[in-house]
Amino acid sequence: MKHNVNPSSAHGMHKGHQTPRMEKAKDFSGTLKQLLQYISKYKVSIAFVILFALISSVFSIVGPKILGNATTEIYNGIVGKISGSGAGINFDHILQIVISLLFLYSLSAVFGYLEGFIMTNVSMKVTYRLRKDIIEKINKLPLKYFDTTNHGEILSRITNDVDTLSQTLNQSITQLITSISTIIGITIMMFNISWQMALTTLCIIPLSFIFIMLVVKRSQKYFVQQQSYLGHLNGHIEEIYSGHNVMKAFNGEQEALDTFDEFNQSLFTSSWKSQFLSGLMMPIMNFISNLGYVGVCILGGYLSINRGLAVGDIQAFLQYVRQFTQPIIQVSNISNILQQTLAAAERVFEFLNEEEESKDTESPICIDENNCNNSNNQVVDIAGNVEFKNVKFGYTEHNTIIKNFSVKIKAGQKIAIVGPTGSGKTTIVKLLMRFYELNEGEILIDNYNIKDFTRNDLRSLFGMVLQDTWLYNASIKDNIKYGNLNASDKDIIQAAKDAHVDHFIMTLPDGYDSIINEEADNISLGQKQLLTIARAILSDPKILILDEATSSVDTRTEVFIQKAMNNLMKDRTSFIIAHRLSTIRDADLILVMQDGDIVEQGTHDELMAQNGLYASFYV
């Protein structure tokens, strides 16, 4: 589903985009612990991965030793033939060695395949679970989080960061296990052949780790920057794409490009530095391994001449030296990947650890006996009386918007809320639906505090038609049905007729099955508004909220909509937020708000007679 974004001005397009202060991850050990806890659910599979990796490595490691026996057999046969003391090369024995090698390498490949298959399955399950938890988390977060967080940042955590985790689990973890087991196995085999040459080879390990730590220390911060700037870049692109019409209308192309270039340059710099530093690993490790290789060659020649070390053992040992440095290089490369992974994991877990909406009461009041989880809970029939008692609220601690709001509304009344921009009209509606928690006071519905209901039950009482329409990429029928997912096609068509949108729908080639595109720009603003009104009609709510619901329709259509609204509002409590005062003349009660307080209230005629703020709106 996609939100239709309607930016109010070109100058507000980049609001919230600030160059982030880059630093190292705050808690790598804590992030790693959380990640391990996440994976621990699949510990049995991980255990099999480790077991199969060890078996695969053992079979692979034994190979050079057996191949060395073949080399020794060939060498002894040739020497014996030349000296006349032997019968030459024993090809039958060599054939047996080759067959055993093929068998060992085949087993190694089979266990390697099983290891990769299981780990792929685990990584996909972890990725699925992470994305599922993120989506569930989004539904549990308070709206204030989305007021202060860029949408692109959230999308980046769901896509880029989770993908980074998935790739690491799928590839790097198995490679890390294999590399470590290979290092251990090769070390044992090298000591078995010659402890002198083994010690010579092991001298490269401390030298290797010194260089690894130096590179890791410098590259870590750039991997963190890379992930963070990627999120900011995605956020900017998402914002500009959603509001591209406004951006073009106000000639904001250059500003958008400048902001993009700023983020893109920062991403380029951090990515270049991180990749350059991680790319140093391979040439450094190759240089160090070559030093060890030269040392082993010299010492091996000496031991062969003076100590009688078999030629095949020297050949096997040289293979082990090459194999020994390769997993060390892999571990060093994986260390860089793990840094990037932990940086991504930290961003994901930061999101998952965000403070959620306060929990619903343990013994909520039920409005539907069929959906009541506990038979002992009170079941009530809501009429629609609403009362605000000394409500105080601010989006931040130091900015109180609603200062002391109190009003009683009887069921079935039509309440209009008017006032200048920023007076708190829409905020009152958000508080009524418990999108935000009050600082002080309480809101009652039929004398029950809204906190005594579950949020699902509370919001099921309301039907909303907002100034900013919201439709998603689906058929017109599905968009209307969003108001009541259990509605029949007959109910959907009747709701469309009541909203005076059925005629327009039937003029489309596919009628109610016509698809609204991703940006919902293949129908007009007025038509979109009509569809959202039909959706509200279909929901059949106890309380209606109309936030400038007819602002996007023409005058002729507005007359039809007003008639449909009058029928819809009959016997229902209705809150109408309006800028067109002509739409609220017949309201039962008009509340005039200014600076978060009710400064006037009464009917249209009463307020006009007072010649106050309301009357000034007509001037």
Image (cartoon, grey):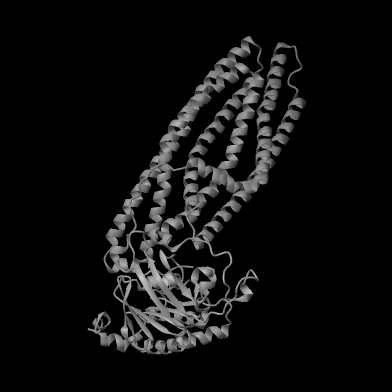
Left or right: where 379 falls relative to 233: right
> Which is nearer the eye, 305 or 505?
505
User: 446 and 481: which one is in front?
Assistant: 446
Q: Position of residue 334 (x, y in %)?
A: 52, 38
Q: Give the image quarter of residue 387.
A: bottom left
Residue 424 percent across, percent down from the top left: 34, 71
Note whether residue 385 is visible: yes
Residue at the spot 65% in from the left edge and 18% down from the top edge = 311
Q: Residue 146: x, y in percent?
A: 42, 61
Residue found 34% across the figure and 68% down from its top? 403
Percent coordinates x, y for residue 472 in the rendering:
47, 71
Left-right relation of 224 to 62: left
Q: Is residue 312 visible?
A: no
Q: Residue at x 31, y 57 (%)?
A: 257
Q: Residue furthest left?
A: 619
Q: Is residue 318 above or below residue 543?
A: above
Vertical relation: 12 (above or below) 347: below
User: Along the line of sight, which residue is nearer the eye, 364 or 169?
Assistant: 364
Q: How many marks?
A: 0
Quarter occupied by residue 300: top right
Quadrant assignment for the C terminus = bottom left
Residue toward you, 404 or 299: 404
Write the residue at 35% across / 68% down. 402
